[in-house]
Amino acid sequence: MNALDPVTLAVLKGRLEQIADEMDATLYRSAFNPIIAEARDASHGLFHPTTGATLVQGSTGLPIFVGTMAFAVKAVIDKIAGADGPAPGDTWIFNDPYLAGTHLNDFRLVRPFFWNDELFCWLASAGHWLDIGGNVPGNFNARATETYQEGVRIPPVKLATRGVVSQDLIDILAANSRTALSNFGDLSGQINALDLGERRLTDLLREYGAGTVRSTFETFTARAEALMREQISDLPDGCYSFEDYLDNDGVIDKPLLIAVDMTIAGDRLILDFSRSSPACAGPLNIARSTAIACCYVGLKHIFPDVPANAGCLAPIEFVIPATSILGVEAPRPVGGYTETILRVIGVLFGAMAKAAPALSTAAPFGTINALSMAGERNGHRWVMFSFFGGGLGGNPLSDGLNHGNNPISMATMPPVEIFEAAYPIMFTQWALREDSGGVGKHRGGLGAIYEVEALDEYGADVFLLGERGRFAPFGVAGGGEGALNRFSWLTGKGEFSPPMASKVTDVRIAEGERIRLETPGGGGYGDPFERDVQKVARDVRLDYISADSAREKYGVVISKSNAIDADATMALRAHPGARRP
């Protein structure tokens, strides 16, 4: 490996990351699907020519995709092993979640990049397509018991040979989707992103040479490994365990255990998930590749200074039994993977809170609330899908973020105007949810309340795959739990909630009827009686918490004029019996 001076290394680091960022931006600006174009449910990166390991990722894409795309690239490498090998312009496409992680909606495009007739690296793109067949529009089928009920599974196949795209393959994909035009637009955007990546990488190599850029890749990886080992070494040796639960799998109404035993031994970390529940009947399973990728994301939150590439995983050993809910193979359904990976990240946070409270954070709201509404208008099918925000956990430095996204991504919710312009629906409420954040010295962030009304005479079919309806986001270091998730639909016959608490597939609302989603807040951090009374008063003024909560949970008495009653507050906080669980 050639030694690089710090200035050159810093410049190349920025240039390479900019390539991935531009690929992200190209897809965001050209995709037809709001979940990519507005919510940024996509990602791009550069990958090792022989191992497929992550070399560079974009700063705006979904980290969970970057973690799983290394498996996607390796799947292509393995498929062509022993064959003639790739050629310039070849591109593979697939959505097989057992090879590439996540679920069927997430399509990967993988393309080799050549320099002077030598394979230099791979470029890859991942994006969430709106619909790919299956029993449920949008593919979040909470009652699926096998992958065939979730959509069409495509193994790694050649989309393009030496730059010539297979129209036959595009026709097959179009014939198996309710939203063929949207998917075609997203596919074209991903192809354009790969084209852009090739051009930018060509420019870079012409300027600096292959040897220098290759040395940069090697330096990135070595530094990420060294820094991760250093961070682990600073932690106290020992085994730290934590458990949390999923409500159910959508088919059998029984909690599912997600448990980790985290062993710190010098500069090594062992993450053992053996105590987690076995594979389940419904779609809350995940593949091993997905489990490792979400651990990568969780560790990056805990150790934010470690560079984001494959080197940071070198000191980590994963124990994930093949019989576990976290290590399934086909045809086990995996459509609800988002809920399970959030619980995996949460238990990592919980275990780390025991090992190093200063690095810990309370649980985020822990569900994407995958909501699909679908119908028919003017003879055409429409499918609206989105995920929804909630509160992030309090941490040693600050309150959790109100109405944020989960820690699996940089994605954002599409704006109300986009939804209402594209689909026959109207949001009648979009507001913060009072008292939803867990109490603490640093309060959990607030969840939100959304109400959506159907406007078309057909009404709308409604599908939800969510979580945290029965097991609230946990607090740490004495902090309290966030509020539970709550979903209901309001009709002329009354208000109804799912028997499975957070999942439903068989609801139709009529024109003028509404659905209502109340998302969880994050857990709290620290003793709530240590919270600054001025912050409590501010929370009451902003309707983040009620005056009753201020008194009962924080020991702060607020008058009707929103003034602090200092004497009553001092007396309440001084009285040990005043503390509430």
Image: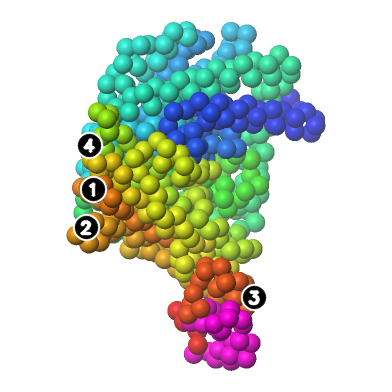
Element carrying mark 3: helix
Name the amino acid type tagged 3: Gln
Earlier in the chain: of badge 3 and badge 2, it is: 2
Q: State which mark lies toward you, 3 or 2.
A: 2
Magenta residue check for 569: yes
Vertical order, 27 against 482 (above or below): above
User: Closer to the camera, 341 or 434?
Assistant: 434
Along the line of sight, which residue is nearer the eye, 338 or 219? Answer: 338
Identify the residue position indicated by label 1 in the image.
510
N-terminal of the pair, mark 3 or mark 1, is 1
Q: Which residues are magenta?
A: 550-577
Nearer mark to the viewer, of 3 and 1: 1
Q: Which residue is mark 2?
A: 492
Residue 288 included in the magenta stretch of the image:
no
Q: Which residue is mark 4?
A: 135
Determine contact: label 1, label 2, CB under 8 Å: yes
* Disc 3 from disc 1: Cα separation: 47 Å
Mark 4 or mark 2, which is nearer the start of the sequence? 4
Amino acid found under the numbered disc labelled 4: Asn
What residue is drawn where x is 39% and y is 31%?
Answer: 129
